[in-house]
Every structure is written in C-alpha cells, then in structure tokens.
Image: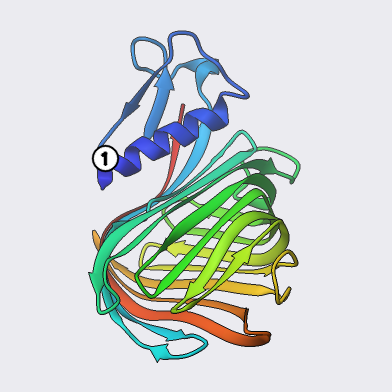
Amino acid sequence: MLKLAKYVSGVLTCAAVSWVATPAHAQVKMDAGAKVAVGDTSGNCQGDKCVPADVVVYAPFDLRLGRWTLEGVQRDYDPLQFTVGINPDVTVHAMGLTTRTIITANLGGGNAGFEWNLGGMWMFGGRLSIGQGEEGGLFARIGLDTHLGGNSDYYMSHLSLPRFELGYQLIKIDKMFVEAAGRTGLTLTGRHEVLDRTRDLGFSLEAGGTVTLQMPFLRLYVDAVRIYEKDNAPETPVDRGTLDLCGLLSRFSLCFTASANRAEVRSYGDDYDTKADFIGAKLQATDAQITHTNF
C-alpha cells in the first residue's frame, strides 16, 4: 500500500509542476517517507530547478465490516457484508496549482453475495488567492468522477464529467489539511438498483459539497451530492452521500463509515422510495502524511 501511495503521489506531483517547470533530464526519486524530488541526472534539486510542493497522502489498506439497510418496492433486507480494499487519496499543491486523486477498489461478500466496488476521482485546478507559498486559499478544480459497484441485492453507478469544485484549502505541514468545497457538474449516465427495481440515470445536473479534515490523529471525509435526474421516470432527484471518521494511531486507524443512497422508482404506475444505506467500521493499515518537498 505504501508503494502505491508513493507512485500516485509522484505522478500527481509531476503533472502539477509540468505546467510551470520542465527541467532537462529530470528523473523522479522517492524515499521511504513518500517524499518526491525531481532534479537533474545527478538526482539533486538545484537552484532554479527547484519547485516547492505540498503533498497530502492518505493511503489505507482496509478491512470493512458492516450492515446494509435495503428498502425496495416489495421487500426489505439488511445483509451483513465484509470487504477488503484500498482507497488512496493524494492531494498536491505546487506553484499555485492543485490536484487531487482518489481511487477506490474493494472486494468481499456476505449475506448479499459477492460485493465489489471500483471508482476514482481525478481533479486538476489552481489556487485563486494572490501570491505563492500560502498555507491556505480559495481554489477551483475540474475533472472526472466515476464509480460502480454493489452486490447481488444492490447496485449503483455514475459517471460525472465534468465535475467542478470551488472551495477553500488549508495545508499546514505535519499538522493539518483542510478542504471544504461546493461541487457541481454533469452526470452523464448511471444506475440506482435496490433489490427488484432499477432507476436509470441520464444526462443530469448534479450539486453537492465535500469536506476533508486530516490531522496526525484524526481524519474526516464527507461527500454528498444530489443528482437532478429528469430523463427517466419518476423524474425526481437522486441523493447520495458518504462519511468516514477515522482515529489514527501510528500506521493503523479505526474508522466509522457510513453511506446513504436514496431514489424514487416507478413500478406499475406508482412511485416508491427506495434506499441503500450502509453503516460499519474499518480497520486500516494506513500511510498518512502532510509533507513539504522540493522538486
């Protein structure tokens, strides 16, 4: 998991600074602390070839156990599920530019059969505040957000392109990382399926918000979105949200995790509320860092 975090951090950082600095014969080196340096062929960062960057890494390998609450048209079901997965989250701020990548992948099973999830978010933008080297400031980003997965009783998917974010970012090295942003964009396609009924998602506007707080002993991640779906009956909004609250201890963390997925579906001319909510816990082997480095 640590190697994956190093790789993602290096790729993102190089992408961020390539717009403002392109030293010849550059190479990437990574030490055991996931710090990245780009320099000449000697491996040293020298003079005007140095670009300062803040890198925030949260890269867990997690074991998740919890219960789904599924409410469909004809029946309800509360299956217990267990998954194993990874969820690296890497943010880079360099020369006024900011990128963020989140990848989700897990497999498992339980009372609702085989369960899997695969998704990712790739965002690129910049600080809107004047000046360089500031700890905090307003930012704007644009990118891609996609996810799909479920089990034999529940399935969800979405493709958001483009996704826009406008918010505030604060990075205090070794102490604190905060991002709070409003989000909007276009849902191009997707699906909400609970038990025996399906609601397809067509071309739709979406809007919501996201908050991330990371400290040496704590991490909070919240994301919520409403999809204003009008292409498929009953033409009512679809709501989705997720919450992770983790206590960090050295290389391990223990988390409370929850998600909510709500939508109306039409069945034989009538509209019914359906939901797929999850509450559980995660035990994680975690690489969590808020570092500053020179490229």
Between 49 and 271, the residue placed more toward the observer is 271
Foreground residue, 191 or 18? 191
Q: Nearer the viewer, residue 161 or 40?
A: 161
- Visible in this render: residue 34? no
Among the 4 quarters of the image, the one containing residue 39: top left
At which x and y percent is residue 185?
A: 70, 55
Q: Is residue 291 above or below residue 186?
A: above
- Res 166 → quadrant: bottom right
Whether residue 229 can be seen here: yes
Which residue type carries mark 1? Lys
> Percent position (x, y) of residue 251?
23, 59
Please state if 249 lies on the left or on the right of 40 as rendered. left
Residue 42, above or below 31 = above
Q: Is residue 144 left or right of residue 54?
A: right
Viewer-closest of 97 and 244: 244
Q: Residues within 10 Å of mark 1 (few under 14, many from 20)?
A: few
Residue 190, compared with residue 228, is above or below; it is above
The kind of secondary structure element at disc 1 is: helix
Residue furthest to the bottom: 75
Residue 98 lies, in percent from the top left, at: 59, 42
Q: Give the residue at x 44% y 91%.
A: 75
| For residue 29, side relative to residue 231 (left or right) | left
Q: Residue at x 27, y 66 (%)?
A: 114
Residue at image coords 48%, 59%: 176
Compared across the picture, whether 275 is left or right of 108 comes to: right
Percent x, y for residue 177? 50, 57
The residue at the point 24 percent across, 69 percent down is 109
Q: Which residue is mark 1?
A: 3
Residue placed furthest toward the front: 268
